[in-house]
Amino acid sequence: MSGYRVLFGQMMHETNSFSTVKTTLDDFNPMYGEKIVETLKGTRSAIGGYVDVLEREGIEYIPTIAAGATPAGELRNEDYWHIVNTITDGIKKAGKLDGVLLALHGAMIAEEVPEAEGVLLREVRKLVGDTPIIITLDLHGLISDMIVDHCDAIFGYDTNPHVDMYERAAEATETLVKTIKGELKPTVAHCKLPMLPPTINQRTAEGPMVKLLEKAREMEKSTEVLNICLFPAFSYTDVERCGSDVVAVTDNNPELAQKLANEIGELMWSLREEFLKPLTSIEDAVRIAMEASEGPVILADVADNPGGGAPGDGTEILRELLKKGATNVGVAIIKDPEAVQEAINVGVRGKFSMEIGAKTDDFHGKPLMVTGTVRTITDGRFIHKAMAIGVPVDVGRTAVIEVDGVEIILTEKSHSPNDPEIFRRNGIEPTDKKILVLKSRGHFRAAYEPFSKKILEVDAPGLTTPNLSWFTYRNIKRPMWPFDKEASFG
């Protein structure tokens, strides 16, 4: 062993300020201590990346807590402090530490702590002093001075869909190891922009992010530049630190870090209009999908995306499909614990008849009366085979009901069906379907795009709609593009 000791933890939640659903500690299903390693070692997760590099380098590690939840409303205050205190108590008990690694999101808020990640980092810094703290963040993180001032380096995901969580965590850990050994001295700077684009066109395989990433990769060719990461922002968290951002990390050259962050910031601002994207109406989307010569045609319900804090129980696309008589359709998902219980009550092959969906709030349509047959009932557990490969998932008890050729996956918990395993776990082969309805904004593309024939992003109602005029912001700094024409940068 090297004799070095590193502590790590995870606190990840993308908070939708407009959700009516409070997030609690139970939603995080937290793991503690060695259970974290038992569960996540060998997975393509951030913790998996930390552990692999630390073990390869012969560094002793102290796992504290791994807490991550499906996006929803703000976290209860006492539950937030439980996570923070678990990490800080771990630091107090650990004794001498040579480094800290934290897997964070960047767009998390608690009831009384709008700077959730920044406050955690501040508390950690109080305890560890000059000991290096390196963090990984989601590409949709909201960067603040508090975050930057209380860590030594930031590694944000470079991909959207986020298929590089493991790689970025491994890179962060390698940088920490070199820092501990005195081979590097990271310095970090950021550039905040007065723009808050909807997430719909923040993919990294097309659109403005491609140009920005090309520029970042060019900058990283310099040996002085350790990392450039882009944060186009999560537009559904109404806090003061909202806005797109660029972070640069250099080797002991803060002036260069600021210069590079500003340079890409200027480019991002110049491309702001390219982040906007038109959607397809529900009626047109259903018509196009039904008329397609082959499938699967994916109807992405981008406004009811649990991955952005929507409940996943919107009914309006499903309503139109049933109205128009579409068949060979798979729908993932409708979150409705009452409907799941009714399906369990009537049993497999039993007749199911009740209103489903739209029971969380008034933003996602109205409950839909359906009559059909229960096809399968499962415990809702499966293993990710896309994105966070190897990480277990639990969406609660799950039932599939078939209504006139439309198979609907009902779940107890909100879940963004970015992995086709949610279909297969419940007896549906997604590649055989003519039409698939997915409650997702874009992460589904990593696994579904290779076999889909067409993808339509549908203009349905919901808490993650790209139409940001739908929301009333009270805390963001103004002026802010695209709300204010007078917004300017530079």
Image (cartoon, rainbow, N blue to C red):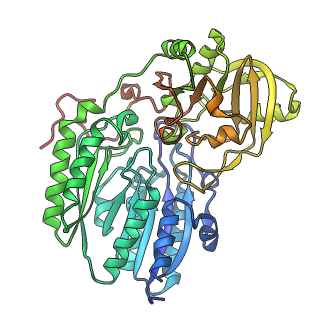
Query: Is 369 displayed left or right of 417 in the figure?
Result: right
Q: Position of residue 465 (x, y in %)?
A: 44, 29
Q: Is residue 113 above or below residue 332?
A: below
Q: Position of residue 265 (x, y in %)?
A: 20, 47
Q: Position of residue 115 (x, y in %)?
A: 39, 55
Query: Is 20 displayed left or right of 39 in the figure?
Result: left
Task: Name the residue rendered at 60%, 41% in the picture.
Answer: 415
Task: Name the residue rendered at 46%, 37% in the picture.
Answer: 442
Q: Is residue 72 above or below residue 129?
A: above
Quarter containing the C terminus: top left
Give the farthest residue toward the front. 293
Q: Quadrant of residue 99?
A: bottom left
Q: Position of residue 413 (x, y in %)?
A: 66, 42
Task: Name the residue rendered at 75%, 24% in the picture.
Answer: 402
Query: Is 150 displayed left or right of 305 in the figure?
Result: left
Residue 359: tell me if it is visible.
Answer: no
Residue 255: tell me if it is visible.
Answer: yes
Task: Name the residue rendered at 47%, 76% in the picture.
Answer: 54
How many labels, in total? 0
347 or 310, which is in the foreground? 347
Q: Quadrant of residue 466?
A: top left
Q: Quadrant of residue 238?
A: top left
